[in-house]
C-alpha cells in the first residue's frame, strides 16, 4: 500500500510541475532559456543510449558495432529528419551484422 501511495504521489508531483511549466506565458521565458530547453530531448536520448554503448555488466567496454550504429543513426537523422527512419536504418545495420549478412 505504501508503494502504491508513493507511485501516486510521484505521478501527481510530476504531472503538476509539468502542467504548471506548460501553462507559463511564453513572455516569461527568456530566449536563452527557450534555447536551452530545446536540448532536453537530446540529453534524454543520450542518457538512454550511451550506457548501452559503453557499459556491460557494470564494466566500461568498447562495442564498435553499437558505436557505428549510433553514428549511422545520427547521419540518417540529419539527412532524413525522421526519427523512425534513422532508428530503423541503425537497427537494421545491427541486425544484419549480428546475423552475419554484413561481414565485419
Image (cartoon, rainbow, N blue to C red):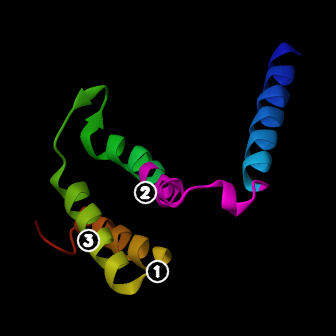
Residue under label 3, please give it: 72
- Residue 43 % position (x, y): 43, 50
Secondary structure under tag 2 reads helix
- Secondary structure that dominates the magenta span: helix
Secondary structure under tag 3 reads helix
Secondary structure under tag 1 reads loop
- Residue 14 % position (x, y): 74, 38
Location of the N terminus by quadrant is: top right
At 26% from the left edge and 71% from the top edge, which residue is drawn? Answer: 72
Q: Is residue 3 above or below residue 37?
A: above
Q: Which mark is residue 42?
A: 2
- Using the numbered discs, state the Cα–Cα distance from disc 3 to disc 1 in whole angstroms: 13 Å
Location of the C terminus by quadrant is: bottom left
Q: Badge 1: how crowded within 10 Å, few (<14), some, or many (20+)?
A: few
State the extent of the magenta-drawn residues as a range. 23-43
Q: Badge 2: how crowded within 10 Å, few (<14), some, or many (20+)?
A: few
- Using the numbered discs, state the Cα–Cα distance from disc 1 to disc 2 in whole angstroms: 14 Å
Q: Which mark is residue 47?
A: none
Q: Badge 3: how crowded within 10 Å, few (<14), some, or many (20+)?
A: some
Residue under label 1, please give it: 82
Task: Name which of mark 3 and mark 2 comes first in the sequence.
Answer: 2
Q: Is residue 96 visible?
A: no
> In the shown orientation, is residue 17 left or right of residue 43?
right
Which is more foreground, mark 3 or mark 2?
Answer: 2
Splitting the image into 4 quarters, where does residue 91 fall?
bottom left
- Residue 101 % position (x, y): 22, 75
Amino acid at each position: 500500500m505504501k508503494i502504491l501511495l508513493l507511485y501516486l504521489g510521484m505521478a501527481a508531483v510530476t504531472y503538476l510541475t509539468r502542467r504548471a511549466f506548460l501553462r507559463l506565458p511564453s513572455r516569461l521565458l527568456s530566449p536563452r532559456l527557450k534555447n536551452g530547453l530545446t536540448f532536453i530531448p537530446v540529453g534524454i536520448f543520450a542518457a538512454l543510449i550511451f550506457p548501452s554503448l559503453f557499459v556491460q555488466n557494470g564494466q566500461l567496454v568498447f562495442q564498435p558495432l553499437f558505436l557505428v550504429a549510433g553514428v549511422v543513426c545520427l547521419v540518417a537523422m540529419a539527412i532524413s529528419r525522421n526519427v523512425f527512419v534513422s532508428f530503423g536504418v541503425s537497427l537494421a545495420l545491427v541486425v544484419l551484422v549480428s546475423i552475419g549478412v554484413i561481414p565485419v
